[in-house]
Amino acid sequence: MPSLLVVAALPLCVAGHGRMTFPSNRNGGTLAVAGKDDHCELGSNSGGLPHNLDTCGYQTRDSFQSQPYAPTNCNADAMTGNLINAAGKVHGDCSKVDSKDKVWKMPWAAPGKAKLWSACGVNGGHQSSSTKDKHGKPYPSPHDGLNLPPSLTSSKWVIGQTAEVGFTLTKNHGGGYQWRICPGHSASHNPPVSCFEANPLAFASDDTVVQWTSGKKEKFAAIKVNGAHVTPRNSEFRTLRIPMTAQLNSGVRKAPCKDCVGNKVAHDEIRQEWDFSLIDTVHVPNVPVGHAWLQWRWDNEQQDQVWTSCADIEIVAGGPNPAPPSPPAPPSPPAPPSQSRLVPGNSLQSGGVLVNGRAQLKVQNDGNLVLRDTHSDKSVWSSKTSGHDNAYLDFNTAGILAVRAADKSRLWFAPVHGTPVRAELQDDCNFVVRDASGKSLWSTHSSCSGSSAIVV
C-alpha cells in the first residue's frame, strides 16, 4: 500500500465518537491526530471550528429505534458487541430473531437501513434544541454537517483506479461501516441522502490497514457483510473488528492484530481514544467527472446511532488525454426475444426480454427487472424495483447498467468496476457484465434449478 501523507487541516482536535481522517475532510479529522486527546462532549465545541458548528459529532440518533425494520444481519461472526450472544442464538437465521429483544433495534442489525437526518450528520445527533443533555440543559441549536466548510484540499480520484480512505473512533460502539460517494454535486450544492445510497463504493482489498499516528502500520483480514444482508442490496459493509472493551476484557473477542486496541479510558467501557486510523482501499467507479462528495457511514451495534463524515473529492478520467464524456444514448428499441446480451448504448424497454435457453431476463410492466428459470417458472433474481410503470433497463455508453424510471431517475444499478463491454444472460440463469477480456465485473450470482455451480 502506498504511503499516506499525514494531512494537516484546520481542526486539530478530534471531535465525536467517530469520523473520517483521510482524505482531507469537512469534519477536520486527520491521520496525525486520529482519536487522541479527545475531551469533547456532545453539544459542545471542538476541533478549532467556529462555536456555532459544534463539531463534537455528526450523526443520527434513534432513527432505527423508531422504525420497525426487520433484522438482516444475524451472523455472530460479524458482531463485536452486544449482538454477539443474540446472533449466536439464531445461528445467522434472522427469521428466528426475538422481535421484542431491543438489541435487534440497533442499526448494525440491518446495515444501511436506518434513515439519516442528513447525509453528513447533525452535530450531537439531535434534531432540535428542545433535546436536553443528562444535566437537563438544552443542547445548542443543531448544525447540519452538510454546511461545514469544504475540505481544505480536494483529493483527485481517477476513474478505474483505487483510492485510500480512513477513519478513527473515540468511543467504540461496534458495528460496521461503508464508504459512499455522490457525484455531480458541487461543493456548495448540498446532495440528498439518496445520492450516496445509489453509489456505495466497493473495497479493492481483502485487508484493512491500521496506521498509527507514529506512522507504524499493521493489517488484518476484513470481515465483510454484503448481498441481501445490507442496504443497498449487493453492496458491502465491513465489520469494525477492533473489539469493544467489555468483549476484549472477557475474551469474547480478540484484537485482530498486534496492538490493535484503542487506548481505554478509566471507568468507561466504550471510550477508546484511538491513536490510529483504519485505512481501506476502494475502487473509483465510472461516474461523471468533476466534484463529488465522499461519505463515511458507521452503523452502530451498541447504540442507536449512525455516524457520518463527508469530504470533497475530484473525480478525473483515466488516461493521458481523456476525452469528454459522451452524452447518454437515447433508449434503443426493445430487444428481440432471441437476444441474450446488451452492449453499452443498448436498453430494454418495459416488456423487453433477454433469453438464453431456459433463462429469461425481463423488464416487467411494473418496473421490476426479473431473471426467471422458464422450466420451473421460478424467479431466481430481481432488482426489486416494482411500482414504477414504464421503467426500463439502461446500459449507457458510460458503462452504467441501471433500471431507470420513466423520468430517467435511477432505481437500481449494478456496482460495476472496470470497463464493461457487454452484459450477457447465460443459459445457467446468471446475468453477467464482462470486460473486453471476458472477465466478470459483476453478476447476479443466480442459477437455474438443478444447475451446477455458477461460473462467471
Image (tube, rainbow, N blue to C red):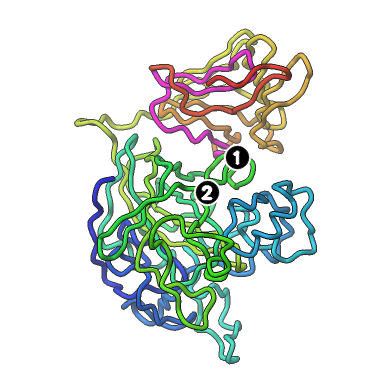
Q: Residues within 10 Å of mark 1 (few under 14, many from 20)?
A: few
- Give the side of residue 380 with respect to residue 201, left or right: right
Among numbered discs 2 and 1, the one appearing first in the sequence? 1
Q: Is residue 190 above or below residue 198?
A: below
**Splitting the image into 4 quarters, where does residue 14 fall?**
bottom left
Query: Does the stretch in magenta take in 299?
Result: no
The span picked out in magenta is: 410-436
Task: Tell me the kind of residue under disc 1.
Answer: Gly
On the picture, is 269 further left or further right than 369? left
Instruction: Tell me the residue that label 1 is attached to.
Output: 227
**Image position, residue 180 (x, y; %):** 46, 49
- The residue drawn where x is 51% and y is 20% is 423
Q: Give residue 191's position: percent from left, percent from top.
A: 46, 55
Relative to 99, 355 lies left or right = left
Question: In the rendered image, is residue 352 in sight?
Answer: no
Indicate the quadrant containing the N terminus: top left, top right, bottom left or bottom right. top left
Whole-percent x, y for residue 346 in the image: 50, 20
> Residue 201 in the image: x percent, y percent?
45, 44
Residue 274 sits above or below residue 368 on the image: below
Where, by quadrant of the figure, is residue 425 drawn?
top right
Asked whether residue 328 appears in the rendered view, the answer is yes
Amino acid on which disc 2 is placed: Phe
